[in-house]
Amino acid sequence: MSITGFMANYMLRVNISIAIVDMVDTNLTLNGTRFNWSVVEKTDLLGIFFWGLSPAGMIGGRLAEKYGSRLTLGLELLVASLITIFFPISCRIHYNLAMVLRVLLGASLGAAIPGMLPLCVNWIPPLDSSKFSSNLMAQGIGISITLALGGYLITYCGWESVFYVTGCLGLIWCSVWFYTIYDSPDLHPRVSDDEKNRIGESMKEQHINNTRKPSSIPWKGMFKSPPFWAIIVGILGNTFYHFTFINQLPTYLHDVLNFNISENGWFSCLPYIGKHPTCKLPNNINVFSGYYIFGCFGSHIADHLRKSKKLSTTNTRRLFTIFTFFIPSILMLTLAFVKVHSLTAIALLTLIHSFKGCVASCYIANTMDIAPNFSATIFGSGLILGSLGGWLGNKMVGLLTQEASDFESWKNVFIIISLVNFFAGGFYFVFVSGDVQDWNHIKEEVEDGEAKALNISEDNKICF
């Protein structure tokens, strides 16, 4: 359900990315209602989403820590699905109403990753946390399906159909989620006692006790912690790239590489999910690597390195910083300075985003390394800056391409994103830690009035 949940979440996020190519261009399809929006208005509609997303990660993450992931994530996707279904109507009524719904959509989808982390802490032993984190990369599958299917839906049914279809799929997912998911094995009515015991024994072997939950957030300890800021800066750098390209890639393919709407959907999806080498795509493009495949493959390697003690948790996270930040930055500069054939550009974009899938074994899993009790709060804190970075990225594209959306304009976009990624990765590489931080420990009052910390601070062990 976590895999399909992130698929559904990102389907609701990116449907507008492919739809807006047709919404404001009268030359691409014969169906649907088009709008006379400027480049700046278009990018503002895409970017305003992040103003809702920014506080939602923190609030939703904290709600998941206190009240459970089941209720938090289920309700957020339910609301987002309803907003998506009504979005085409809002566009016809007034541009400002559409802007308001985009903010509300961001607010309702922002808790996805931070809200899932408490569920991971309750169900998954810490030495398998990277593999669970790779489920988050299923967002790539959702993006791929939406962009590929969206091109055909727009061609034959009009741009509105993209929102209706993805919104209905979200409602279906919500019904299944509430039926199948519970916040811990002990609460699940359909998990056998034998399975509950096996999960409990696995947790005990790695010194986990999830019966106590924190009542307050140790902000002072967090803000003084270099590993905390390493994760925050890592999130900022990666989301600046990620959120910008989620929204702007179809526009780049249309304006610079001159793909039509059906081809646009297919080629936009390639960076997000791998295809078998013999899979036939338009113009016989064969793509092997992808976002989801790299995320899954990398997470298995990361957990193997930690379990076998070939690398410490800290150095494992540093290793995957190279794949998540440094290699994509170099490839992006190549895309900026070398005017390549359109198919070569697609291959480079696919490779860039494939390496980005390794983020599952980088700062995402690292939140559970340093503070499992507050992993959702940490990630939500990072999304406050990261979401604003996503808004700035979309605003940047609008400003740099408003005169002409051509190779030279996009060259500057790639250079800026590359530099932000490189410096964010460097900061994370220096200050990352795989050790549980002291401020993670819950303190409980004892009879003599003194506070004692329930403390297990060895690398790879969860504290409570």
Image: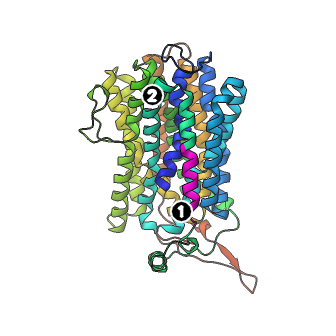
For residue 180, the mark is 1
Quick one: label 2, few (<14), some, or many (20+) residues within 10 Å? many
The residue tagged 2 is 151
Q: Nearer the viewer, residue 368 or 6?
A: 6
Locate residue 6, reporting x and y percent: 50, 49
Q: Nearer the viewer, residue 91 or 402?
A: 91
Q: Is residue 230 above or below residue 28?
A: below
Q: Residue most toward the bottom?
A: 447
Quick one: label 1, few (<14), some, or many (20+) residues within 10 Å? few
Q: Amino acid at mark 1?
A: Thr
Q: Residue at x 64, y 42 (%)?
A: 82
Is residue 226 something one can see in this rendering? no
Q: Residue at x 57, y 34 (%)?
A: 163
Give the quarter of the image for residue 45. Answer: top right
Which callout, 2 or 1, points at the residue further toward the start of the chain? Answer: 2
Locate residue 411, reporting x and y percent: 44, 22
Q: Amino acid at mark 2?
A: Gly
Magenta region, residue range: 169-183
Is residue 409 toward the left or the right of residue 88 in the image? left
Q: Is residue 156 magenta?
A: no
Q: Residue at x 62, y 18 (%)?
A: 35
Q: Is residue 73 above or below residue 210?
A: above
Q: CA distance from mark 2 to mark 1?
A: 33 Å
Most common SS among magenta residues: helix
Q: Nearer the viewer, residue 431 or 368?
A: 368
Locate residue 264, reporting x and y percent: 42, 26
Locate residue 114, reporting x and y percent: 58, 54
Q: Secondary structure at mark 1?
A: helix
Q: Secondary structure at mark 2?
A: helix
